[in-house]
Amino acid sequence: MIDYDFNRNEWLYSTSPPITGPSWNPKDIRFFNIHYTGDSNSYAGKSEQAILNSIQKDYQNNRGYSFGYSSAVGLSGSTYEGRGDTYRAASNGMENNYGMDSPTIGDNLEIFSCLLIAGVPDIPSAQLVNGVRKLYQSVIDRIGRELIINGHRDMAQTACPGDKIYSLIQNKTFYPVERSKDDMETLRIPRRIIDTRESNSPVTGARSFDIKPRSASVVDAEITVTAIPLTAEAGYAGLGPTDSFSNWTQDDINKPIPHTFSAPVSNGVVSLYFSTKCHVIITVRAEG
């Protein structure tokens, strides 16, 4: 269950139509996709609840379906359930008729979307950032693996979610902050240790990665490896050439392939193998 400060029955007006939609499958979700309210001048003086109801009314009257976002977070830091983990998001455009089952970003199958109740003139508040972090953590706890946080503009021709918010996405501000201790304990919040996209240095073959434990006693860790194949050929990632933990087909080029597993650690290093050229994102939870 995802935790919200307000579920949809708590913020929807009694006169508002209910939120509905096709069901989702948590196994398909790969992205935590951030939106904003755009030019929010028309919302001046309105409460966050009133703004959400205005958006719900607009969706229902002008688009023919209900509030399209999975969730929302206000400048106050409050989190709101939208379609939640009951219904598929409807906020990222569609490549096929809505309701089709082909696994495309356009059909929203791979997306949990978050509307930030903040517009062009608004300065993202510390409370908003903390609200997104709290919500993101609850979502990945529900799904069971880390998601890629990106902006609507990463998936469509749009300025959404605005330059101020998008800069926070680029700086990874919305990922939860690891707690600071002298020694590593069991981490509830995953810590990203590498993203090869940042250096544009894809990997292939056998590679070792330093998980940087604070304690030399770390002997195994829960690792999430997201491989992004860069060639149109089948491949796999694993602990070695004969021990794969995730596989992809030639049609998965540039598609993130995440997998979470328990990996052995030797002197703070985990060894992995990638059969074809790919970018990798690695996060870790470890005990020491």
Image (cartoon, rainbow, N blue to C red):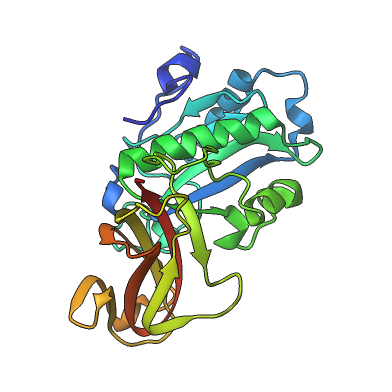
Given residues 169 and 208, the one toward you in this image is: 208
Q: Is residue 267 left or right of residue 130?
A: left
Name the residue at 40% across, 62% down. 268
Above or below for 59 versus 108: above
Given residues 287 and 71, the one toward you in this image is: 287
Q: Which of the 4 quarters of the picture holds residue 65?
A: top left
Q: Which of the 4 quarters of the picture holds residue 269?
A: bottom left
Outermost residue toward the right? 121
Name the residue at 48% across, 20% down. 5
Name the residue at 58% across, 78% down. 200
At which x and y percent is residue 217? Answer: 35, 52
Q: Is residue 38 left or right of residue 184?
A: right
Q: Quadrant of the N terminus?
A: top left
At which x and y percent is residue 3? Answer: 40, 26
Q: Which of the 4 quarters of the picture holds residue 174?
A: top right
Name the residue at 19% across, 75% down. 243
At which x and y percent is residue 277? Answer: 41, 85
Outermost residue toward the left? 242
Above or below for 173 versus 52: below
Q: Is residue 65 visible?
A: no
Given residues 50 and 167, the one toward you in this image is: 167
Above or below for 240 versus 75: below
At which x and y percent is residue 214? Answer: 47, 50
Q: Is residue 135 visible?
A: yes
Q: How many numbered marks have been drawn onto this rendered protein structure?
A: 0
Outermost residue toward the top? 14
